[in-house]
C-alpha cells in the first residue's frame, strides 16, 4: 500500500471517463473518483464489482409482499371478518383481488425504503457524519480522480496531464 | 442482404400445410343439424368431458347475449343455440389466429412509429427487422377484411348484433344499432386498415429512400408522418378493439378495452422483434446489433408485460368488485367455463416474464429471451382466445384441430412474408442520420 495519493482534477465527465480508462490501462491503481453527478459507465471503467443492491431489493419486495398478505389476512379476514364487495365469503383467496393494491404498495414500500437504508449502511453514511470528500468543488462542477502513487512520480503526472487534468497535486494518504 | 434460408422456407410451408389440414378438419367436423350437435356433446361427456371442465355442457350453457331471446326451458332453442356454438367454433378459431398475427404486425408498426416520432437513436439497426414484420400487415389486412365481409354476409354467427332476429328481441342492442350495423362496421374497418397500410407504405418508402439520399429530407418526412400516424392510430386502435372484439359481447363494455388490446399487441410485437433479431444474429446477420440492443428489447418485453397486467387487473378488479350483473357476466363466463386459460394466461403473461426477465443479466441472455418470448407469445394467443371464444362458442371450447391449425397456418404465412420481406432491402439502414448512435449504443 502506497502512502501517497495523486489528486487529478478534471472539468468534464467525458474527459474523466477517458482518463480513467487510460490510467487503468497504464496499470495504476485508482483509489476513488469523486463526481458531482453519476457518470454513466464509470463503474465499469474503474472495474468496480457489480452492485448487489438489486438482489436485496428483490428480497425486501418479497418481505413486503409477505407482510401485506399476513397483515391484510389478519385485519380483513380473521380479526374482524369483512363483507367485501357484497360477497361475504370470508375467505382470503376469494377476496384476493381487493387486496392486490395493498400487496403491491407494501411490496414497493418495503423494497424502496429498505433499499435506501441498506445503501446508506453499505456506504457508511449516517446523520451528522463528517464529509470524506477531499475537495468540495467535486459537489459543484469538478471531477477528482485519486490515484495511488507507485513508481516514478514524474511519469504518472505527465500521464495525467496528457489525459486532460486541469490540476495535479500530491497528498499524504491519511487512511494508510 | 439477407438470403431466405431454404430450411426456414420449408418450415414455413410445412406449418401452412399442417395448419390448412387442421383448419379443414375443424370445418368438416362442425355439425350441420341440431341432432348432430347434441350427439357430439353427448360423446364428449363420455369421452373427455372431464378434461376440459365442460361436464355440464347441456345444463349450464348461458352466454349473456343469448339469455334474452331464448326461453331457458325451450328444448329446441337450446339445441339450436348449441348448434350455433359448435358451428362457430372453427370460424372463431380462424378469427383468433387471423387477428393474433395481424396484431403482431400492427403492434410492430406502432412501436416503429413511436421510435420514429421520438427520433430514438438506439433502434436504427433494428428498423429493417421491424419493417419486415410490418410487411405482414398488408396480407393480414386483406385476409381480415375478407373475413369481416364474410361475417357480415352471415357465413357465421360470431357477432350476435349482426343477427336481425336477435336484435328484434333485444332492447339494449337496438339502442346501439346506430353504431353496430354491418355497413358502418365494414366502412370503419376499411378506414382503419387503409390508414394503417398507407402509413406503412410511405414510411417504408422514405426509409429505403433515405439509404441512398445525401440529405435528411426523407428522415424528416418519416418523422412527420409517424407523428401524424400515431394520433390516427391511437384513436382507431381503440375503436378497432371495440368493433372487432368488444362488440362480440354487445351488452358489455369496458372503457379501457382499447388500451388493454394495445398492451397485448405491443408486448407480442416487441417479443417477435426480439426473436427475429436473435434468429438473424444467430445466422451471422446484423453484426452491429449487440447485447445492448437485445437488452433494451427485453426491457420492453418486461415493462410491457407488467403494463398489460396492470390493464388486465384494472379491468377485472373494478368489475369484480362492483359486481353489477350486466358487467360481471363477462368475467363469470370466463371464470366458470374458461378457468384454466383465464388464470393460466395471467401466469404466462405476468408471473413468468416478471420473475424470469427481472434480472439484468437474464435480459442479455438470448436463450432466456427466446424461452420467455415463446411463453409470452402463447400467453397472448390465449389472451385473444379468451376475448373471442366465450361470446362465440360459450362453454364448447377446446384447443383442437381448428385452433392449432389456425395458429400454425398463420404462423407459417407470417414467417414466409416476414423473411421474404427481409431479403428485399439491406439489413442495416445506413443512410439514417442516427445510425452511428445506434452502433455506439450502450444501454
Image (spheres, coloured by chain):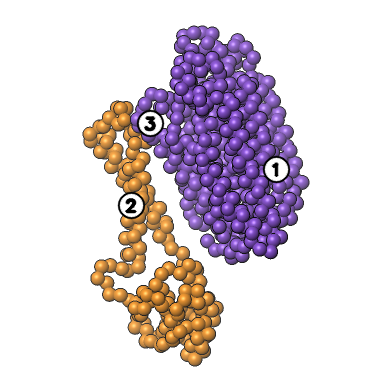
Chain colours: A orange, B purple
B285 up-or-down from A1: above or below: above
Q: Which residue is mark 3?
A: B320
Residue B368 visible? The answer is no
Q: Are marks 3 and 1 on the same chain?
A: yes
Q: Chain of mark 2?
A: A
Q: Residue, x 33% and y 47% (percent of image)? A: A106
- Number of the label disc, if any, that sits on residue B211: none
Q: Which residue is mark 1?
A: B417
Q: Position of residue B378 (x, y in %)?
A: 57, 38
How many other residues sit within 10 Å of disc 3, few (<14), some (14-19) or many (≥20)? many
Residue B165 visible? The answer is yes
Q: Which quarter of the figure has residue A167?
A: bottom left
Q: Position of residue B310 (x, y in %)?
A: 43, 42
B162 on left or right of A34: right
- Give the number of the mark in front: 3 or 2: 3
Number of labelled discs?
3
Q: Chain of mark 3?
A: B
Q: Position of residue B217 (x, y in %)?
A: 64, 59
For the residues marked 3 and 1, what is the alpha-carbon distance in whole angstroms? Answer: 42 Å
How many other residues sit within 10 Å of disc 1, few (<14), some (14-19) or many (≥20)? many
Q: Position of residue B366 (x, y in %)?
A: 59, 53
Amino acid at each position: 500500500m502506497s502512502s501517497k495519493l495523486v489528486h487529478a482534477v478534471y472539468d468534464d465527465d467525458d474527459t474523466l471517463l477517458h482518463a480513467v480508462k487510460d490510467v487503468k490501462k497504464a496499470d495504476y491503481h485508482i483509489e476513488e473518483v469523486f463526481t458531482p453527478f453519476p457518470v454513466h459507465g464509470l463503474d465499469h471503467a474503474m472495474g468496480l464489482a457489480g452492485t448487489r443492491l438489486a438482489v436485496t431489493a428483490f428480497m425486501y419486495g418479497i418481505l413486503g409482499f409477505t407482510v401485506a398478505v399476513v397483515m391484510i389476512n389478519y385485519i380483513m379476514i380473521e380479526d374482524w371478518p369483512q363483507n367485501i364487495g357484497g360477497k361475504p365469503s370470508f375467505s382470503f383467496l376469494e377476496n384476493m383481488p381487493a387486496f392486490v393494491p395493498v400487496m403491491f404498495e407494501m411490496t414497493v414500500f418495503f423494497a424502496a425504503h429498505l433499499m435506501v437504508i441498506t445503501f446508506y449502511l453499505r456506504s457508511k453514511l449516517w446523520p451528522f457524519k463528517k464529509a470524506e470528500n477531499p475537495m468540495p468543488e467535486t459537489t459543484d462542477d469538478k471531477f477528482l480522480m485519486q490515484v495511488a502513487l507507485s513508481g516514478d512520480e514524474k511519469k504518472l503526472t505527465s500521464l495525467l496531464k496528457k489525459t486532460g487534468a486541469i490540476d495535479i497535486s500530491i497528498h499524504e494518504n491519511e487512511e494508510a | 442482404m439477407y438470403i431466405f434460408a431454404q430450411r426456414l422456407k420449408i418450415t414455413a410451408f410445412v406449418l401452412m400445410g399442417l395448419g390448412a389440414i387442421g383448419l379443414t378438419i375443424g370445418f368438416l367436423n362442425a355439425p350441420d343439424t341440431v341432432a348432430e350437435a347434441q350427439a357430439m356433446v353427448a360423446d364428449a361427456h363420455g369421452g373427455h368431458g372431464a378434461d376440459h371442465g365442460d361436464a355440464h355442457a347441456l345444463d349450464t350453457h348461458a352466454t349473456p347475449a343469448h339469455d334474452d331471446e331464448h326461453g331457458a326451458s325451450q328444448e329446441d332453442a337450446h339445441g339450436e343455440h348449441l348448434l350455433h356454438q359448435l358451428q362457430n367454433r372453427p370460424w372463431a378459431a380462424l378469427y383468433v389466429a387471423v387477428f393474433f398475427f395481424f396484431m403482431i404486425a400492427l403492434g410492430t408498426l406502432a412501436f416503429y412509429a413511436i421510435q420514429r416520432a421520438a427520433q430514438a437513436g438506439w433502434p436504427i439497426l433494428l428498423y429493417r427487422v421491424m419493417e419486415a414484420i410490418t410487411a405482414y400487415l398488408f396480407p393480414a389486412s386483406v385476409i381480415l377484411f375478407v373475413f369481416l365481409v364474410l361475417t357480415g354476409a352471415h357465413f357465421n354467427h360470431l357477432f350476435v348484433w349482426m343477427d336481425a332476429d336477435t336484435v328484434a328481441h333485444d332492447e339494449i342492442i337496438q339502442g346501439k344499432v346506430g353504431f353496430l350495423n354491418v355497413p358502418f362496421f365494414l366502412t370503419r374497418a376499411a378506414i382503419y386498415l387503409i390508414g394503417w397500410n398507407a402509413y406503412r407504405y410511405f414510411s417504408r418508402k422514405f426509409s429505403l429512400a433515405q439509404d441512398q439520399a445525401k440529405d435528411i429530407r426523407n428522415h424528416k418526412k418519416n418523422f412527420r408522418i409517424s407523428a401524424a400516424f400515431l394520433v390516427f392510430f391511437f384513436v382507431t386502435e381503440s375503436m378497432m378493439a371495440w368493433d372487432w372484439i368488444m362488440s362480440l359481447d354487445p351488452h358489455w363494455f369496458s372503457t379501457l378495452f382499447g388500451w388493454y388490446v394495445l398492451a397485448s399487441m405491443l408486448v407480442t410485437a416487441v417479443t417477435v422483434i426480439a426473436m427475429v433479431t436473435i434468429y438473424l444474429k444467430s445466422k451471422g446477420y446484423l453484426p452491429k446489433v449487440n447485447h445492448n440492443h437485445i437488452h433494451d428489447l427485453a426491457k420492453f418485453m418486461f415493462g410491457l408485460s407488467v403494463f398489460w397486467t396492470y390493464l388486465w387487473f384494472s379491468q377485472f378488479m373494478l368489475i369484480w368488485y362492483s359486481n353489477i350483473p350486466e358487467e360481471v357476466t363477462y368475467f363469470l363466463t370466463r371464470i366458470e367455463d374458461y378457468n384454466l386459460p383465464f388464470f393460466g394466461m395471467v401466469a404466462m403473461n405476468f408471473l413468468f416474464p416478471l420473475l424470469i426477465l427481472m434480472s439484468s443479466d437474464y435480459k442479455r441472455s438470448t436463450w432466456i429471451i427466446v424461452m420467455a418470448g415463446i411463453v409470452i407469445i402463447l400467453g397472448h394467443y390465449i389472451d385473444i382466445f379468451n376475448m373471442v371464444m366465450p361470446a362465440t362458442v360459450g362453454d364448447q371450447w377446446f384447443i383442437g384441430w381448428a385452433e392449432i391449425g389456425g395458429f400454425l397456418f398463420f404462423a407459417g404465412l407470417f414467417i414466409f412474408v416476414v423473411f421474404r420481406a427481409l431479403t428485399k432491402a439491406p439489413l442495416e439502414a445506413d443512410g439514417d442520420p442516427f445510425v452511428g448512435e445506434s452502433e455506439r449504443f450502450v444501454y
